[in-house]
């Protein structure tokens, strides 16, 4: 059966996850428009349409949305760590709010949001910012897929592989098994497949993809 082609609007399309996602969507026959800050156009995958705007402003995003049926929200602080609490509130949370509000105003069919695994014993400000965006998505009545990875391993981001023995031990202990699964590592390939599949299978209501579901993702 032929795959339905989607018109996809992406914020954060020049980042670690966004570059690979846009290339995959284009290769699979989808149209992609990406919101960028002026001067970043050269970082965008060939074949995607670049539009200049402010990802923290719904008013700036909204005029560029038509004819998108899918909105993928990827804007966030690079290399999150606990010292960046203020930036999580100012960037991650505000960009999420702006994207969700613009999508709701334009009646976008499906909103795809990369959140974070929760609850978690660390990175509480990061979790709070992403959780607040999830709440806004629900409050706006958007049909959405919310992905909750903990750490995405890929080029330049491979040091957590050293923690694999620790994760294996936690999975063996009943008291820590659930946490080990919820906060497991996700490869960039798995994350990309989960996002592509989310775009190609829009939902009614809210669909949550936790770490175990993302780890099982493969391109169809």
Image (cartoon, helix red, strand yellow):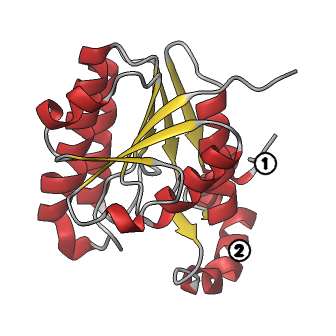
Where does residue 147 sit, x and y in percent of width and height?
52, 42
Where does residue 37 sit, x and y in percent of width and height?
22, 57
Q: Is residue 194 left or right of residue 172?
A: left
Q: Is residue 154 left or right of residue 144?
A: right
Q: Is residue 158 above or below residue 91?
A: below
Q: Is residue 94 among what the camera can see? A: yes
| Residue 169: quadrant of the picture | bottom right
Residue where numbered disc 1 is placed? 218
Of residues 113 and 59, the one nearer the viewer is: 59
Q: Looking at the image, how many numbered discs can be counted on the residues? A: 2
| Residue 132: quadrant of the picture | top left
What residue is shown at x 33% (from left), y 70% (from top)? 78
Q: Residues within 10 Å of mark 1 (few under 14, many from 20)?
A: some
Q: Which mark is residue 95?
A: none
Q: Is residue 25 above or below residue 179?
A: above
What residue is shown at x 11% (from left), y 63% (from top)? 86
Residue where numbered disc 2 is placed? 169
Where does residue 46 sit, x and y in percent of width and height?
52, 58
Measure the alpha-carbon separation of dots 2 and 1.
26 Å
Q: Is residue 150 among what the camera can see? A: no
Q: Is residue 169 left or right of residue 79?
A: right
Q: Residues within 10 Å of mark 2 (few under 14, many from 20)?
A: few
């Amino acid at each position: 059966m032929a795959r339905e082609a989607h018109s996809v609007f992406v914020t954060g399309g020049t980042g670690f996850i966004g570059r690979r996602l846009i290339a995959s969507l284009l290769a699979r026959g989808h149209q992609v428009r990406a919101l960028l800050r002026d001067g970043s156009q050269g970082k965008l995958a060939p074949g995607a349409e670049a539009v200049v705007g402010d990802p923290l402003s719904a008013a700036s995003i909204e005029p560029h949305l038509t004819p998108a049926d899918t909105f993928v929200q990827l804007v966030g602080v690079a290399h999150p760590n606990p010292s960046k609490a203020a930036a999580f509130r100012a960037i991650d949370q505000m960009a999420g709010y702006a994207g969700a509000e613009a999508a709701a105003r334009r009646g976008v069919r499906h909103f795809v949001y990369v959140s974070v695994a929760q609850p978690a014993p660390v990175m509480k400000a990061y979790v709070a910012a992403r959780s607040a965006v999830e709440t806004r998505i629900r409050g706006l009545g958007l049909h959405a897929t919310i992905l909750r990875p903990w750490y995405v391993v890929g080029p330049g981001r491979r040091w957590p592989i050293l923690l694999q023995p620790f994760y294996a031990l936690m999975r063996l202990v009943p008291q820590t098994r659930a946490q080990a699964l919820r906060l497991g590592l996700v490869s960039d390939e798995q994350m990309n497949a989960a996002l592509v599949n989310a775009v190609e299978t829009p939902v009614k209501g809210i669909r949550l993809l936790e770490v175990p579901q993302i780890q099982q993702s493969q391109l169809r």
